[in-house]
Amino acid sequence: MVTNSFDVAILGGGPGGYVAAIRASKLGLKVAVVEKYHLGGVCLNWGCIPTKALYHIATSLEEIKKASTLGIKMSSPKLDFGKTMSRKNDIVEIQRRGLVFHFKKNNIELLNGTGKLISPDTIEVEAGDGKVLIKAEKLIVATGSKASSVPPFTLDNHGILDSKGLLSLDKIPGPLLIVGGGVVGSEFANIFSTFGTKVTIVEILPRILSTEDEEISQVIFKTFRSKGIEVYTKTRVEKVKAKTSGYIMKLSNGKTVEAEKVLISVGRKPNSSYIGLDKIGVEADSSGYIKVDSNLKTSIDNIYAVGDVIGGFQLAHVASEGGKIAAENIAGKSKTISYKVIPWSVFTSPEVGTVGLNKDQATCKGYKVCIGKFPFSSSGKAYITGETTRFVKIVTDKETGEILGAQIIGSRASELVHEIAVAMKGELVIDDLANTVHSHPTLSEAVMEAAEDCFGIATHKS
């Protein structure tokens, strides 16, 4: 058994692990990464990147269908699903090769195999050609998470699918039932409905996108219904029966739904089993999430953990930020992670962009809330692009002007929300945002006018 020594060894090559590796290497440390599958983790291979590749195609298809409103005449577009999936696969492969290049450029050792911790400074890696021991002064656990299932279903990635299975289809599915109306379920509903699939969502909670501002959740609900997507809230699947070409399911509301495929999108659970945590004494909670402090250090002094495996915000960019912080702390700095300013997006049509607190959350925390809101129907640029629906909403502390959060729904919401995130991170007050001159005509003017609306002086709001 070969033994290799490093300054830092990282278990997991997803957004938390590979970013930690690159940052640690740039800080002068000798780094090794153990990855069972492909660099990039779920995000690159079966999550963020491939789904947004399909989302872009779906959005482009919608734009082409609306071309006649711009005076462009063309025949009805048809989707070549084979080429669509090939493009998605090409994008993923290019990104994978890019990560391998970055590893080589930064002299990071990549070991493909299954790793587990056998001591506080050693990872045992089982690969096809035997076992290797990786010893390091510091370890980072970045093993991510995996899809959860829910009764009465059993994931088989043939007919009962997780997101990885759905992204591996070779033809557009017939009727699709999505169990879970959160971010993943809503994004796939939008994509495959646009592709021509009949989609039904079953959500046990009172509304879809339950983690979002209630007004935004209602907008997406109404938009889905207008697209022909059936949405059943406060509902669960009670029985499922296989048939020749799919499944028949009985719902708790008394309805029966038939589907060719079923997507299970009810959350994720940590990949913390069978990696040796118990053996070496790394503490985890009852759900398997590793406990860390604000420096991302575990109960073992030289071991850190980042990303989905520690719970909280299960977002790729949060994992990456954690990876940077862990690497910097290992290199001798003292950095803590803050979750106060974390932007995120939902890639439906229309898009959703969120950062910080919504009105209800801010009120529950005791703030005297002031809301500034501006509709895209009053934006000149929105009329130019034909995207005049929806709004920008900014939540502030009425007494201090502190920006507490924002919710945007509409065209480019996933990009616009970062303007407010930067303002929050820089501790600007709402006056600063309102008094910042914005180029005209742009969608970002809606952010300025929403800030002005906190004072009742938005120029173009009627």
Image (cartoon, rainbow, N blue to C red):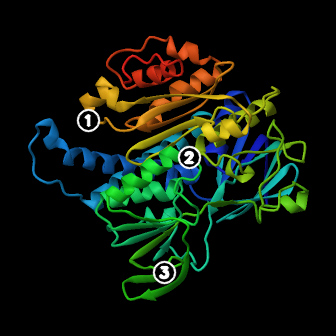
Mark 1: which secondary structure?
loop
**Residue for badge 3:** 254
What residue is drawn where x is 47% and y is 81%? 249
Circle 2/circle 1 CB separation < 8 Å: no
What residue is drawn where x is 13% and y is 43%? 68
Say whether disc 1 or disc 3 marks the residue closer to the N-terminus. 3
Image spot of residue 151 (x, y percent): 61, 77
Q: CA distance from mark 3 to mark 2?
A: 28 Å
Say whether disc 2 or disc 1 marks the residue closer to the N-terminus. 2
Q: Is residue 233 left or right of residue 459?
A: right
**Residue for badge 2:** 212
Q: CA distance from mark 2 to mark 1?
A: 25 Å
**Residue for badge 1:** 386
Residue 456: assigned label: none
Say whether disc 3 or disc 2 marks the residue closer to the N-terminus. 2
Question: Where 87 sits versus 20, above or below?
Answer: below
Mark 1 neighbour class, 10 Å CA radius: few under 14, some 14 to 19, many 20 or more: some
What is the three-letter code of the residue carrying label 1?
A: Gly
